[in-house]
Image (cartoon, helix red, strand yellow):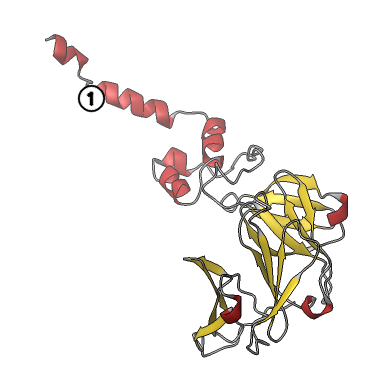
Amino acid sequence: MENQDLMPTGSDQGNKQDLWIDLPPEILSLILSNLDGGDKAVFHAVCKTWQSITNIAPPRPQPLPSQFDDPCPWLIHIFSDKFRFIHPIHNYYTCSMDLPAQLSGGLVIRFSKYGWLLMTTPNYYQSCLYLFNPLTKEVIELPRLPCNLQSARVMFFTCSPSEPSNCVVVIIGGYDRIGFHKLGKPDWEIIHGGLYLPSLHRSCFNPILYKGLYYIMDREGNLGVLNLDDKEHIWTWIAHKLIPDFSISSGT
């Protein structure tokens, strides 16, 4: 008998359901404002009362992002002397911060990884490069580019700039020139790859690291591999015309 008393009756279950239905619209609106994507559809499918909640409360301010505690990669928008973090699911500006003085003026992001950005001046023949961590506001100014690398668009770094003894910045310049800069060194090292690469240095694709090799697709759909450990045979084409029906252009 005691066990039977612990079992919920139909009236008890109905009362609990009524409690959810009778939540104030303000609370339901707040709940809805914290849901993403398909969760909103599930919310509206609960009952007619919840389906009627359409006025979403203003989203709460989000904390400064961290590359370690959020499964979603945050987007960043740079305008003039400010940058804004954007959550890709919530789709609203979450915070706005001032750029360091040396980065103001509308720099272009060329590559991003490990929480760092590789940025250049916006003109076609850029000569100034910076590594910037928007979370810590740390800036690393790189040596000015040699003239034969200034029109390049494919550039990346091999590991986190927080490990300067291991980090190398790589730029694929016009024709067959490939430039290297190890953090802490005063200059760039330029190697001639032995191949004519006019369609590669204007590519809009970021390199993909796989088992120690860097795979890069040019704007005509050809795939090549960059081997930084073998500078005598640093570049090899491995597949041609993977995208045969149209040419891919980098735009700027």
Image quadrant containing the N terminus: top left
Q: Position of residue 9 (x, y in %)?
A: 22, 21
Foreground residue among 249 and 100: 100
Residue at point 51%, 66% (across, down): 212
Residue at point 49%, 43% (across, down): 52
Say how many tags the image has: 1
Q: Position of residue 88 (x, y in %)?
A: 59, 53
Q: Is residue 157 above or below residue 140?
A: below
Q: Is residue 75 above or below residue 189?
A: above
Image quadrant containing the C terminus: bottom right
Foreground residue among 3 and 244: 244
Q: Is residue 159 above or below residue 71?
A: below
SS for dot 1: helix
Residue at point 23%, 20% (across, down): 8
Amino acid on which disc 1 is placed:
Gly
Foreground residue among 217 and 28: 217
Disc 1 designates what residue? 10
